[in-house]
Image (spheres, grey):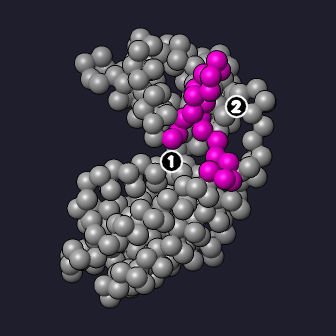
Amino acid sequence: METISRIFWDLSMQPLEPIDQSGNLSEEVAKRLRSAIKAGLFQPGTHLVEQDIAEQFSVSRMPIRIAIQKLIDEGLVIKEPRRGAFVHTFSAKELDEVTSIRIALEAMVLEYAIPNWSDAIEDELAGIVERMFAAANEGDRQAIFELDVKFHAVLWELSKHALLIEVVSSLRSRISRFLAEANDRVSPEEVIQHVATHNDLLEVLKKGDVSEAKAVMTEHIWMSRERIKANYAYLGQRDTSAPAQVINSSANSAT
């Protein structure tokens, strides 16, 4: 069990210091909290107490409130009436809903991206896949996760559709922590299979067949859903009556 101070030490690899008052306080707070949530340091159901976080950062409660609202907008945190803000816990139903929307949005990405295909993009994606295989052989799950995100981000940018990029990236961030943790729990063989799906997708993209690319992308996203469901017993079983874990300077948290 660790205190919030210890958690932020792990994130920054340096003693926790007050946030630079000259910068955008709410953005910096949101960045640090987002990193903690996606890294799995703040577990689902963790209570984000404004006053306690403000004390840790040596700032007023206003930037903390703005930062938490930003994370609520991103789907990483939920606000419950008369109870406060909590790190979001997915239900099986919500995961299915997010998956269905991701499939639709990623299909749109392909419609806009494939006409902009180039040899340079092919080389970039091939390089990402090659590095993913290397990371898989080295057992570096974090590198695989980061490269996975980059692979999709290249396609998003290739669509040249600003609003679509904003929406699809936000939706992906909503389940990023769950994907990362699920990927950490699968077997080495399953990791290789996961990486190989990116190579399959690349081969279809090179052919320029939008319909086939959509089918392969759909299967790719569906497999991500299955990894999450297979590795999270709490999906669909959240007990909202249970006391939430509270973040503060004296209480234990995140583990």
* The stretch drawn in magenta includes residue 80: yes
User: Residue at label 2?
Assistant: 1
* Magenta region: 75-94
User: Residue at label 1?
Assistant: 174
Element type at marker 1?
helix
Q: Residue at x 66, y 34 (%)?
A: 45
- Tag nearer the camera, 2 or 1: 1
Q: Residues within 10 Å of mark 2 (few under 14, many from 20)?
A: few
Q: Residue at x 54, y 55 (%)?
A: 98
Image: 170 above or below 245: below
Instruction: Examine the image and state in which quarter residue 20 appears.
Output: top left
Element type at marker 2?
loop
Name the quarter where the N terminus is drawn: top right
x then y, percent, for residue 55: 49, 13
Q: Residues within 10 Å of mark 1 (few under 14, many from 20)?
A: many
x then y, percent, for residue 64: 44, 20
Q: Viewer-proximal residue, 173 or 143?
A: 173
Q: The disc labelled 2 sits on which kind of residue? A: Met
Instruction: Examine the image and state in which quarter residue 255 appears.
Output: top right
Q: The disc labelled 1 sits on which kind of residue? A: Arg
Instruction: Examine the image and state in which quarter residue 147 appears.
Output: bottom left
Q: Residue at x 63, y 76 (%)?
A: 189
